[in-house]
Amino acid sequence: MHSGAIIALTQRELIRFLRQRTRIIGAVGQPVIFWLLFGAGLRTSFRPPSWAAGLTHEVTYQEYFLPGVATLIVLFTAIFSTISIIEDRREGFLQGVLVAPVSRLAIVLSRISAGTILAILQAGLFLLIGPMLSWIGAGADIHVSWSLSRMLMAAVFLILIAAELTALGFVIAWPMNSTQGFHAIMSIFLMPMWLVSGAFFPGGDSGWLFWLIRINPLTYGVAGLRRLLYEQALPVTPELPSMLTCLSVTVFATIVLIVISAKLVSRASANNSA
Amino acid sequence: MPVTAINAESLSYSYGERAAIRELSFSIGEGCLFGLLGPNGSGKTTLFRLLSTLIPVQKGRLDICGHDVSTKQEEVRKQLGVTFQSPAVDVRLTVRENLSCHGRIYGLHGSVLRERLALMLERFGLADRASTLVGQLSGGLKRRVELAKGLMHSPRVLLLDEPTSGLDPRARQDFWDLVLNHIRGSGTTVVVATHLMSEAELCDQLLLLDQGQKVAEGSPVELQGRLAGERLTLRMRDAAAVQTAVEKAVNSSVIVSGNQLSVRVNDPATQITILLNQFRNEILGLELTRPSLDDVFLELTGRSLLVSGDAHA
């Protein structure tokens, strides 16, 4: 394995990120604003889903929305870090990497590791600080677990979601020649995918929306993260799959997307030389 | 017999229906400074991409440093240093970060990496700019970083694609001084794709390409020697008026452009004397030059390198 090359390329991504402060604001700012505004606006009209019945407290919308916003931060970070593939191709840096004696998988993995590190740092920070806002009165009451074991499990699961979404971004960005194209995909595919993942609203009990949510791999990421935020085990309901299902689907999707990414990079096409 | 660094046999490449390179065979000896000369669309960029392993060999065979490019891609890549026409340096990284990142991609680490980094910074006059972001450097310095990056891992073959395009003559000269200094005695083979006469004339060997095919191959002197005679250019008071008379006097066809007459001469001493005797009052100036590589290209293909090349530069 070309670990030296993976570390070098990952480090480059991180340095670039730190030198572009606007990317941090872009990836964290909007989700947090959404969380505060929607949390306040939908407070009275929100009806907690059936899985929340067994909890000792009442789940507010702000609390319901918490794992969804963390996932949105991960999604935005993944998008920003894979959009840079298009910039690298245009600027020429990518050509230099493609002619280097590194395996194509290493090129994919370096992108994914950089995207994942950035995503979990930002989403993790949000999950730590977000609930604290309720203590100072900036949000509704939030009752999440503060035990170390739960937080570690949530962090590990967050890494999985981040790897999955960065790999998805990679698959979309690699064949593209312009960042505008990526923005279009983001509006009509990535954002709707997030909206119907149970992140923003609990799905209906039946109908097309119900099925859309069930076939969406991201649903299992959001649900898994949601489970890990509570100390007690939540019941399995149609809209909240079991932890095992969540883990299996997320791991499977991540592997599939990484394999597709590596295939795309290995495919010596005109695009690779552009 | 010199060791072969690059060997191509019946190499062909096409983008869909359009053939970019046809049945190209050539061989480059180790330590050679080899030029690929041709106008835009001659197939030189495609050949460059094949050499740099960006695109796969479709037909024929290409060996670099004794390794078949199709089967031993990674072995070949280890031997290559590539400088593309579009810069491959990261403008948001400092000079040192760029070189270090590149070195690590090529497997350098620890003290070897540090020593090599210091050496390259020193040799390419970048030591005092090591902590500057590449985006803040001038075009000439950026190219230097590019070159230092390409040579960071001590490649046996250095590929340069139009390396000085966009540079002013001074920076161009600097760039080539660095390249020539670096490769002298090192045995590094350099392949440069260019459309610039001045660059082509620096090369030991040239491959002239047109429409994906080999037009000619040889040293600049050999190629220039292919054209018999020299070129005599006469500046006249009224070139058009004396064209026929001059043609008769030198017994050769004459090209008129503006107030200049241009003619190929085989025996300049005699022919100049005749012309001077006959047209003394008409001639404002005269110049005798060896045929340029562009003349050779023009003679062989009917096309000039300069016209299409200049539009690009």
Image (spheres, coloured by chain):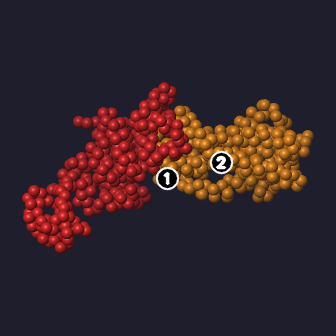
Chain colours: A orange, B red
* Eye-nearest disc, 1 or 2: 2
Residue A143: image x %, image y %? Answer: 86, 40
Mark closer to the chain start, 1 or 2? 2
In the picture, measured across the screen, residue B313 lies left or right of residue A231, that is left
Q: Amino acid at mark 1?
A: Asn
Q: Is residue B83 visible?
A: yes
The chain under label 2 reads: A
Choose between B66 and A61: the one closer to the eye.
A61
Measured along the vertical axis of the image, is residue B114 above or below residue A60? above
In the picture, measured across the screen, residue A27 lies left or right of residue A264, that is right
Density class for disc 2 (Cα within 10 Å; few <14, some 14-19, many ≥20) is: few
Choose between B156 and A238: the one closer to the eye.
B156
How many marks overall?
2
Residue projecting furthest to the bottom: B241
* Mark 2 residue element: helix
Residue B159: image x %, image y %? Answer: 38, 43
Mark linked to residue A271: 1
Choose between A220 and B85: the one closer to the eye.
B85
| Quarter of the view holding residue B187 | top left
Same chain, marks 1 and 2? yes
Q: Amino acid at mark 2?
A: Thr
Q: Residue visible at 71% across and 46% down?
A: A28
* Mark 1 residue element: helix
Q: Residue visible at 25% across and 36% down?
A: B2
Q: Residue visible at 9% across and 67% down?
A: B278
Mark linked to residue A22: 2
Q: CA distance from mark 1 to mark 2?
A: 29 Å
Residue B86: image x %, image y %? Answer: 45, 50
In the picture, measured across the screen, residue A23 lies left or right of residue B244, that is right
